[in-house]
Amino acid sequence: MAGGFVRGFMGPDKKYLKAVPTAKHYFANNSEFDRHVSSSNMDSRDMREFYLYPYKKLIEQDGLPSIMSSYNAVNHVPTSASELYLDTIARRTYGMKGYVTGDCAAIEDIYTGHYYVETAEEATAQGLKAGVDSDCGSVYQRSAISAYEKGLITMADIDRALVNMFTIRMRTGEFDPEEMVPYTKAPASVVNSAANQALSVELASRTPVLLKNERKVLPIDASEIKTIALIGPQADDVELGPYSGRPEQSSMISPYAGIKSWLEKNGKDVEIKLVSGADTRSKSNLLYVIYFELTKADGTVTRYDATKFSASSDGITVGSGMGDEDQVRTIDDGAWTAYDNVDLTDVESLTVGLNIPTEGGIIEARVSSPEGNLVATIEATKAAGVHVGGVYGSSMPVQTKVLKLGLNEPQTLYLVYKAPADAPIDENTLSAARDADVAVVFVGTDEHTATEEADRLTLKLPGNQLSLIQAVAGVNKNTVVVMQTLGCVEVEEFKNLENIPGILWTGYNGEGQGAAIAKILF
């Protein structure tokens, strides 16, 4: 798959590149939450036969012109500081002829995350000598001249990086007359052309996987039905996934639009009932918590480092991610952290410094145990209008009043983290499902389910989508579930329901996904 991607980007011309593909993250970047500080440790055979093997094939067989060094270390050496990994293996062994870019702030991680060296100048020297030609960050930009003046790097080190980058820039035709470069001749009409739209629909038609088809529910015979209910948060949505480019709006075909168009073109008189019916709010990676403060009636404020907890539920981790503050991370629904000897005498308010990586959650402050007396509640959710931080930003304070419990001695304070409660499935949704000959439920994940620095902590469908599937199947014996997700999802609670004879799965299926699903369903 990666080889096809690389060849497509580079184009067929022997001299010029259409675009420059970069393979990332080189290498063994298998963890999101601690990749700026962690080491992926392995023996030499695993390294070459598994973790490096895709890069080897892309370089040797497809002429890959660029790689991106990862944040993590491998065997305790940051990949961005390793001459072995970047020069000896990628260039001299596999034969890569091109440039290496560091991931954004990966050079900085050499000294601020891995503590492999002590200064920015030393990190610049480590990266440049190892073979990182371009710093997606600011360390080279700020420190290269100083590193040169201190004798940590030579002009030859700088020249080598420039040659690697400018050679590839020359291959894009940047410095040549336009008439010499074949890719300058592509007219603007190529973008969003009818042929490319048709290709996206063809690809989207080939990719879905049929997981279940009992009672020959699929394909649906549109001549035999009068009504069809399209239900779910993805029924009239084009889900492209994180980091996708955005096609022109005219190319983006939702399931509802695709099915409506298919029925009209084929002269089928079928009424469509469209209902969203559910949400996709994430119930994992709720928050990143940095600190909390207690403000007393006399105005004194005491700050506590949230990462210095005395106990926690399973799965809690601490890391800085792409920010510069350590945070309590991998917070799931029901998780908690505990803090001993917290004085709650005359406390008026609680302030929590946090980031919201996806949808946010609710923080309950309790004493003595995770189920103990409630002291305060903070609703830190985007639905409540709280928008703080994200995975890249600095923490923001969220404040609430504290309940007066008459506590006058140190306590163990528990911060308990909860996902917002699911909304019930409304009667309008059930009515649409009940009255239709066939109900197709469109569910899945979206860009809020997981994002960079925030892996999923669960395989369950986000939000109340499971309840939606079960509720629709409860009132319609011909329920078909269409899932579009970024990876595996749990289906045990509905896959064997008698009223769900059909289940389809696909990954994020591109701009033509709605036209494709119409072709498949009918």
Image: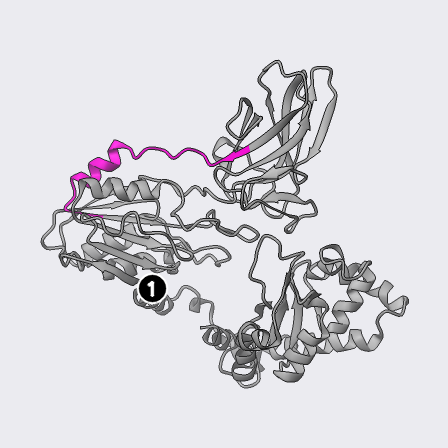
Residue at coordinates 44% horizontally, 73% vertically from top-left? 1
Q: Is residue 376 above or below residue 93?
A: above
Quadrant of the image containing the C terminus:
bottom left
In the picture, measured across the screen, residue 184 lies left or right of residue 189, that is right
Residue 442 screen position, x and y as percent: 30, 49
Residue 21 screen position, x and y as percent: 55, 72
* Span colored in magenta: 416-439
Q: Nearer the viewer, residue 76 or 67?
A: 76
Q: Amino acid at mark 1?
A: Ala
In the picture, measured across the screen, residue 379 lies left or right of residue 399, that is left
Q: Secondary structure at mark 1?
A: helix
Residue 51 screen position, x and y as percent: 56, 72
Residue 225 screen position, x and y as percent: 11, 50
Q: Nearer the viewer, residue 452 or 244?
A: 452
Q: Residues within 10 Å of mark 1 (few under 14, many from 20)?
A: many
Q: Quadrant of residue 214?
A: bottom left
Q: Which residue is mark 1?
A: 204
In the picture, measured across the screen, residue 72 lies left or right of residue 513, that is right
Residue at coordinates 47% horizontally, 47% vertically from top-left? 448
Q: Nearer the viewer, residue 447 or 479?
A: 479
Q: Is residue 362 above or below residue 117?
A: above
Display colour scheme: one colour
**Residue at the far left in the pictured view:** 224
**Residue at the far right in the pictured view:** 150
Check if residue 64 falls in the magenta segment: no
Q: Is residue 11 visible?
A: yes
**Residue at the far bottom in the pictured view:** 14
Check if residue 438 falls in the magenta segment: yes
